[in-house]
Amino acid sequence: MTFRKPMLSALATSVAVLGLAGAAQAQDKEIVTVVKVTGENWFTRMEEGVNAYNEETDGIAARQVGPGRADAAQQAAIVQDLIAQGVDALAIVPMDPSTLEGVLRRAQGRGITVITHEADNMQNTQLDLEAFDNAEFGAHFAEDIAECMGESGKWTSFVGSLGSLTHVQWADGGEEYMSQFPDMELVSPKNESFNDANRAYELAKEILRSHPDIKGFQGGSAIDVIGIGRAVEEAGLEDETCVYGLGLPKDSSAYLESGAVDGIAFWDPKDAGYVMNILAHKVLNGEEIATGDDLGVPGYTNVTVSDGPGDGKIVRGQAWVDVTKDNWSDFPF
Amino acid sequence: MKAGRMDAQLVFLVGINAAIVVAAMALVGDRFMSLYNFQSMGTQVPELGLLALGVMLAMVSGNGGIDLSGIALANLSGVVAFLLAPGLFDASDAPVAFFAMFSVIALLTGVLGGALNGALIGFAGMTPIIATLGTQLLFTGIAVGLTGGSALQLGYVPVIDDFGNMPWMGVPRTFAIFVIIALALAAMLRFSRFGIHLFLMGSNPKAARFAGIRVGAMLFRTYLLAGVLASVAGIIIAARTSSIKWDYGSSYVLVAILIAVMAGVRPEGGYGRVVCVVLSAIALQILSSLFNFMQISNFFRDCAWGLLLLLFLANARLDWGHYTSAVLRRHPATTG
């Protein structure tokens, strides 16, 4: 149909032009990191780690891809096409681990190495990387709080919701650690902030009213410390309280400066991206990972390896990063 | 289509498919042309293709017809089937019976959901875009309520996983089922009274009403059928991902409409061909995989889909006849 020709050729040309970018590839081993969504700060930071590995390592072509929208279907389609391309290894941060099981079973059937992150319930993976053991992470906060409080007084804990498994594990880990101090008293534990800073603020105000002598707060979700910090600041108790929890440096910086929040911790997605690629590389080389191995990245110098739910193994580091008012500005997010 | 007359849209879509494959051969080479890749693309087509067929039915029926609730109903079907099927058969003891029961329950959910759409549009006289937007939220809400927002894991049931992911004699099973459903639908639209009345109604609802066609009942059946197609998509999604999640495929609404429009289905109603929808779905899948192979940003893909949608809508509006000789001028006929 002649009248369709202009459109047809236009399509062909545009496809051709776009193709030039991704045409030539060397014979390097290809490791592709697939994230939940492109363009989010967390995963942009992770890409820095992936790119760093690509530049620092010979014989490896590492890159990161991800869907434009956080949709498990789009992520699955990308993974499926990567398998068809025959890449050497996949390092995946699953949107939803269960939706990828079938696809990754096929990937392994084709001899593709599969590494995952934040998916310790995943069956079809060779190695799953976790930044830390959740109970240890909770105990880490409790340690800071206990030290700051002089090992005596009232304290409480927050969670995003009781359904968030990791948050509950952090709160339980903190409680477990505190049980060694007879003078520490846990009051109204596991307040649910529902990942809402305002809700965390209201809850913290209530607790300050009912327990005016409270000294310690352990945050759960990343915004809990913000809500708690605001309540503490309004009550003018910056110096009397000890607030520690998960948080992001930029978001919490104002409260870190005023002393309403004493310290936060998080894990650096850049390191997680870098270490996923190290693991993929090691598996490609046929190397085993064992407990006590040093992967050469801070926080992953003494990893713990345990059996996963499938045939694979779970690799855990102690990769939390502590942030106080002295060093929050070192982080770009 | 009347015998012996070529359909411009069909030729165009075959040409598009050929052009994309040629482009892929030139740009990516052997890696793209492998059997595995074609099987992989084949397993990705059915879920979107079935939803697009549902959109096509709604569009053909006229009256501003559209079905936005497709993927929401597909996910809800999976959720309901997942919750009810284990009570009747155990997945590990009787996997075949379990999967059959799972499918039946999913299909029944599709019938119910489609009937709700049909009743709202056919009998209550609601505008399709508003009615299906409402039911989309309703279906999604029910699915979230039933699951608490988390994914439901089917686990590894070999029968179901083979159905979703493994080819049979080189052809992915889900793709074969998609083709069979498309053939059945095409035959029904072409030969049955329902099909003939549907196109008449879509072309001119007023004339259809005066000709004695029961427009309300016709609309009801059309949206019911779209609901059934959505539930088949739900079964395929569950098999392919061995899980069900309420928000799976949230980007599918736009893409399903794009496939239908690209296939030349007239949004005003009265025209659309099943074979064109199938070819259009395949073309979009090959293009999408090609983008992935060439490492083109996924933002560009969303942008490209939007552009294509506008381009094809404009194409349907413009009368290209002005620019070509009278000999080449062909207008699409009004029956499918």
Image (cartoon, coloured by chain):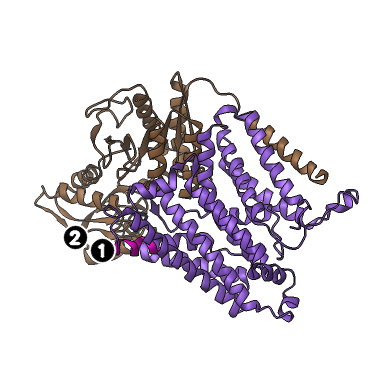
Chain colours: A brown, B purple
Q: Quadrant of the N terminus of chain B?
A: bottom right
Is residue B86 covered in magenta? yes
Is residue B97 covered in magenta? no
Rendered view: B56 above or below A71: below
The mark total stands at: 2
Pinpoint the chain carrying mark 2.
A
The amino acid marked with disc number 2 is: Val
Residue range (magenta): B80-88
Q: Position of residue A153 (x, y in %)?
A: 16, 54
Towards the viewer: B6 or A93? B6
Mark 2 crowd level (few <14, some 14–19, many ≥20, 10 Å Cα): some
Please tell me the numbered disc located at residue A187.
Answer: 2
The residue that appears at 45% across and 18% down in the rendered structure is A58
Judged left or right of residue A16, residue B224 is left
Rendered view: A88 above or below B335: above
The kind of secondary structure the magenta stretch mainly shows is helix
Q: Are marks 1 and 2 on the same chain?
A: yes
Q: Position of residue B252 (x, y in %)?
A: 55, 54
Q: Position of residue B104 (x, y in %)?
A: 41, 63
